[in-house]
Image (tube, rainbow, N blue to C red):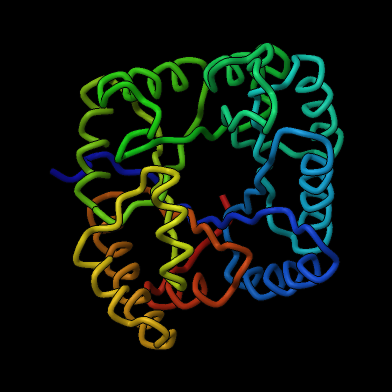
Amino acid sequence: MKSQKTYPKAYSVEFFPPKSAESAAKLRETCAELAPLKPCFASVTFGAGGSTQERTFETVREIKQTTGIDVAPHLSCIGSAKANIRQILDNYKSQSIRHLVALRGDMPSGMREAGEFRHANELVEFIRGETGDHFFIEVAAYPEFHPQALNAEADLRNFKRKVQAGADAAITQYFYNADAYFRFMDACEKMGLDLPIVPGIMPITNYVQLARFSDACGAEIPRWIRKRLEAYGEDVKSLRAFGLDVVSDLCRTLLDGGAPGLHFYTMNQAGPTTSIWHNLGIQSKPV
């Protein structure tokens, strides 16, 4: 069953902070290539712990200052103290950033205690308590359910808690089964949740990398797609052409079914996202 709710379409992209001067230069090129598409915003991932956080801050500043794209920094709370999160919020407020992606995040290596936050709903509640309505807050959603969830119902209840804590919208983990998204939307509607839930889209360019990511995050690669990708072997050109068709068709199905936009996990590459964008004929306008 397809989603019945309608929202203005919003198209966005995600980057991760570069780890070297070379990858930083590559990200600048990617941002320059994607900027003409006018995505509604660019999210920037965030890791718990010193240098990773600093790279996030630097990437956020550079994108905001050089591209004109609205930036939505990720903010993960696991292993963090309230004082640290408060300082980060003040930092972003001073840069006139008004959009965040609030996540639980993963426990840093070697850390045994979760810190002052255990779940993303606690972070959302804290942000609201500290800053009121200053930030538009996105949270994560899992149509195929979080890999650490006890069961599907528990995962839905966790999502509801994030919404009730003050989330404005959600971005899903990537998936390749449109029915999973539509059934998730139906379940949210039955729980009385009324907010845009934007599908996360992962272009297919590298089977080995995709399989590793998917196994780690619980995203299912349908058997027919997996077998086709395996069969291409070292034929990268054919694999990417097939991946472009599969993901473009998925996006069309989602949009036709009422999805309120798409969020592209770019992997800091412009080409795959641009190709899908053009295939879909997206005319994006900033919101």
In front of the other: 259 or 110: 110
Which residue is found at the position 24% from the left and 53% from the top? Answer: 178
Q: Quadrant of the N terminus?
A: top left
Which residue is found at the position 69% from the left and 57% from the top? Answer: 69
Against 9, residue 37 (above or below) is below
What x and y, as percent, mark residue 25? 80, 71
In front of the other: 265 or 187: 265
Quadrant in which residue 92 is drawn = top right
Which residue is found at the position 71% from the left and 72% from the top? Answer: 32
What x and y, as percent, mark residue 29? 73, 74
Against 112, residue 222 (above or below) is below
Q: Is residue 57 left or right of residue 252?
A: right
Residue at the outermost front position:
110
Against 57, residue 27 (above or below) is below
Which residue is found at the position 36% from the left and 48% from the top? Answer: 219
Against 74, residue 38 (above or below) is below
What x and y, as percent, mark residue 35? 66, 68
What x and y, as percent, mark residue 48? 71, 33
In front of the other: 110 or 93: 110
Q: Is residue 50 left or right of residue 203?
A: right
